[in-house]
Amino acid sequence: MSKKLLLKNAHIEGIRYFDTYREHGGYQSVEKALKMTPDQIVEEVKTSGLRGRGGAGFPTGMKWSFLAKPEGVPRYLVVNADESEPGTFKDRYLMEFIPHLLIEGMIIASYALGSNTSYIYTRGEYAWIPDILEQAIDEAKKAGFLGKNILGSGFDLEIYVQRGAGAYICGEETALLESLEGKRGNPRLKPPFPAVKGLWQCPTVVNNVETIAAVVPIIDITGAEYAKIGVGRSTGTKLISACGNINKPGVYEIDMTITVEEFIYSDEYCGGIPNGKKLKACIPGGSSVPIVPANLLLKTASGEPRYMNYESLSDGGFATGTMMGSGGFIVLDEDQCVVKHTMTLAHFYNHESCGQCTPCREGTGWMYKILKKIESGQGEMKDIDLLWDIQRKIEGNTICPLGDAAAWPVAAAIRHFRDEFEWHINNPECLTRNYGIAHYADPLPVVEKQ
């Protein structure tokens, strides 16, 4: 059994309410943190090796240390709860079932950063989540953990929940800040970075829900002990949203020392693939990361087992590897059509592009049209090379990473499954037989459970 830090009390009835959360050790980390100095807390987070759990994986303590601290200027903590990456739903689980864990982490982080006003920006489609969070905030405030002079420490903090309007682009931190200020959610040019000029041009730290929740166990067990969990630079535990062709979809907490094969096939986690199907491919970090075929998913290019951590998943770069990303683990069995799935993702990114950058605005729509043409049985061989050329000219040429997020799935699909694209073009009757399921005259190789 893997060690549980964030979900250890998730099974307890009523854990979403203050009294039950408190009975099981809740807010003890706040009491401990308020007896420390802000700099000591930042050092504990640095020592822990905690990396941002929203996708980028940037060291959290280092990010906090970048925060500018000019005199007479407010500082802000903003929690990015705009969890809109297809295949990712771990933050929703935390907010819905253990909201006080997030609130407790925010109190500690706000104290460390010198923020007296902090915000939670929620995904627009999570319509019921703000009510849960606001109830938790009210409970914490009545108990003296929010408001003026928290526990007699002299530290004041108010937390507010801001509902998004359903725009994926607002998951990008500067677009989120623009939206929070009441403007259209367009990403900002950087520099200046939010740590210098963020919300209302004041120093701001933007962190993901899981990242802030992880601060609680770090203070509880110390950063040094947290760093002992996991391996290398992949320290602590990680929440994984597992879905697709698996027997047990859900949210799992892993310590990043297990192999991908164990995660997919063990009864403790995904429980294998339904109906005895073979594994074809996986998107291991949410829709924006490269898809990986089964043979490279279970083993690295050098033949070593691939592990569920940042370094192992990215081993070899995008030519052979992928990314941990946001932890949205999407499994595809042998019957799944890569062309169809790639088209679906291209449609999503075209729809969600803010339109500010020409390569993204025009390129995402162009890729979707070509993929739809191929999937509908009207494709030509030259369309594959055109797709490759378009994604190459999008990647790295936009203000925010949405362009990259749109380009990477297309690039990886062509890199690893080009023969499937060619099969679609040569066999246009595929869709008339069974929409969305690819039946190959000469099936692509898939990998059995090792």
Image (cartoon, rainbow, N blue to C red):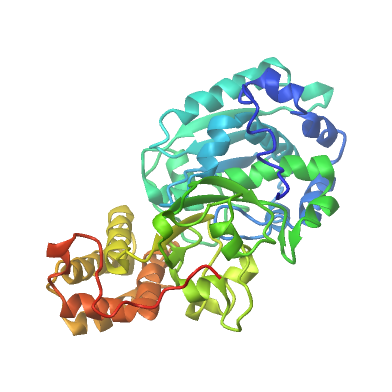
Residue found at the far front of this picture: 276
Q: Position of residue 297 (x, y in %)?
A: 52, 71
Is residue 232 shown above or below 163?
A: below
- The quadrant the C terminus occupies is bottom right
Q: Toward the viewer: 298 or 356?
A: 298
Q: Can residue 87 be seen here?
A: yes
Residue at 29% x, 76% y: name it. 420
Tell me: 357 left or right of 261: left
Q: Toward the viewer: 53 or 162?
A: 53
Q: Position of residue 45 (x, y in %)?
A: 77, 51
Q: Position of residue 68 (x, y in %)?
A: 69, 51
Residue at 57% x, 60% y: name it. 56
Quarter occupied by residue 234: bottom right
Tell me: 117 left or right of 414: right
Q: Can residue 287 be seen here?
A: no
Is residue 403 shown above or below 12?
A: below
Quarter occupied by residue 315: bottom right
Residue found at the far right of this picture: 35
Tally of numbered tags: 0
Q: Position of residue 11 (x, y in %)?
A: 63, 31
Residue at 49% x, 24% y: name it. 131
Q: Toward the viewer: 288 or 193?
A: 288
Is residue 211 shown above or below 120?
A: below
